Amino acid sequence: MLRVVPPALHGVLDYVVAAALVIAPTLLGASGGAAAICFVLGVGQAAMSLVTAYPLGVVPVVPFWAHGVVEVGSAALLLFLGLLTGPASGLFVVVALAIFGLAALTDYRATDRDPALRRPAHARVSARRRS
């Protein structure tokens, strides 16, 4: 499979998906369990992104490949919930398919080949200024 999404772009899209999960229920008028699931998954996505060892992570603890495994698991959960729920099913299915698509196109091994990509972008800029 063609892996064309680099870690930095993946990071941007992670935060976009997290924000979309948090605000989508309000925009779409969803409430109750569906809204709670979106909120929890959105906050979880943002938290995982903050601790992933990739350019947009803040505290690089989770390897980027492990981040991908968790994302695929989250997408599978969303797809499963989308097939079980009524009004929120469309939202869950669309987000799940978007995450699966992003995972399929992301180069999760880029941080293995270039260890500098494991550090947050601000740390790489600071290191260049010192040298």
Image (spheres, grey):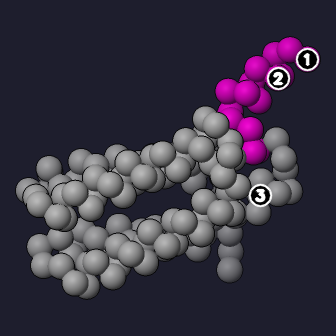
**Could you tell me the amino acid type at mark 3?**
Ala
Label 2 crowd bin: few (<14), some (14–19), many (20+), radius 10 Å = few
Q: Which mark is residue 127?
A: 2
In space, the residues marked 1 and 2 are separated at their CA atoms by 7 Å
The amino acid at mark 2 is: Ala
Q: Left or right: where does residue 57 sit relative to residue 72?
A: right
Does the rendering let one see residue 102?
Answer: no
Q: Answer yes or no: do the residues labelled 1 and 2 have beta carbons within 8 Å?
A: yes
Image quadrant where residue 127 sits? top right
Question: What residue would you read off at disc 3?
Answer: 110
Q: Which is nearer the N-term, disc 3 or disc 1?
A: 3
Label 3 sits on a secondary structure element that is helix
Magenta segment, prevailing SS (helix, strand or loop)? helix
Amino acid beneath label 1: Ser
Q: Residue 73: image x %, image y %?
A: 49, 73
Residue 131 is tagged as 1
Image quadrant occupied by the N terminus = bottom right
As drawn, the residue found furthest toward the bottom would be 83
Instruction: Answer with mark 2 or mark 3, whichever residue precedes in sequence.
Output: 3
| Label 2: which secondary element | helix
Can residue 39 be spotted in the picture? yes
Instruction: Work out which residue is located at the far right of the displayed protein and give it.
Output: 131
Q: Nearer the viewer, residue 84 or 9?
A: 84
Please report the bounds of the magenta region as a residue range.
117-131
Q: Residues within 10 Å of mark 3 (few under 14, many from 20)?
A: some
x, y percent for residue 29: 8, 56
Please report the residue visible at 86 percent of the width from the left and 14 percent of the height from the top: 130
Q: In this view, does 92 lie above or below 60?
A: below
The x, y position of residue 54, in whole percent, is 67, 46
Q: Which residue is drawn at 43% across and 78% down?
A: 76
